[in-house]
Amino acid sequence: MRLQEEYFKRHRISLLPIYYVRNANLILKLTAGYVIRNIEFMEITRRPGYYIFTYLRPNHNGYLDGQYFLKTSGDIRYDEYVSYLLKWAQQMADPPVKNSEIKLAIWEMFLYCFDRWIVEHKLEEAARDQDKFLEYLGHHHSLVREVYNTEFLKFEYNYADWLVELINFYHK
């Protein structure tokens, strides 16, 4: 339990906490795949920083040009952060991916971005077992495995479970 959550619980405050983060990720389940919502704080010397909110959509066969995600982003001022998140969470139509489903979502995005490569290397059957396939990649295609580790697994870290709770609170 985070400090802010413990404080809210101890004082019987029934609000969900919003966290000021340096970097956070949230995966949304769409009808046709996934989209990642990344929140990143940018510091500015002697002035309040700002947040960059980025949507990352997996790029089908993105391995061909090294662009695994198509990006759309916008800036939010520091003092607008909380109101923006509250409004966004209330209007959110797509469900967020739960912690227990993150690995599967990341795996599906990886397969989507390497679809043609998997077919060209006749690895469709092998790709059905994630652990064995990743082990195989580590031994035979280390560059592809490295791409998985650096470009896809990073979204599992700093996962905004607090934002999942906030969205679910408004969409019970």
Image (spheres, helix red, strand yellow):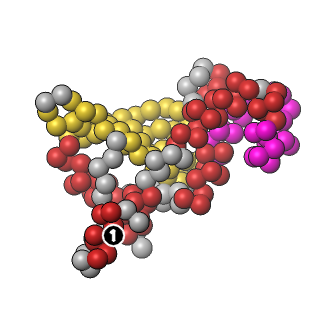
Residue 59 visible, this angle:
no
Q: Is residue 50 left or right of residue 69?
A: left
Residue 108: x and y, percent?
66, 45
Q: Quadrant of the image for the N terminus? A: bottom left
Q: Which residue is drawn at the image coordinates 59% and 60% (left, top)?
A: 100
Which class describes the residues within 10 Å of circle 1: few (<14), some (14-19), or many (20+)?
Answer: few
- Helix, strand, or loop for circle 1? helix
Q: Residue at x 60, y 20 (%)?
A: 65
Q: Quadrant of the C terminus?
A: bottom left
Location of residue 44 by image quarter: top left
92 shown above or below 154: below
Please, what is the dominant secondary structure of the magenta stretch?
helix
Which stretch is magenta? 108-135
- In the depicted view, which residue is nearer to us: 158 or 102? 158
Q: Is residue 128 left or right of residue 35?
A: right
Residue type at numbered disc 1: Glu
Residue ID for mark 1: 6
Q: Residue at x 45, y 58 (%)?
A: 161
- Answer whether residue 158 is magenta in the image: no
How far across and down, in percent of the image, does residue 66 sit?
59, 22
Residue 144: quadrant of the picture: top right
Q: Is residue 96 above or below residue 137?
A: below
Q: Is residue 48 left or right of residue 51?
A: left
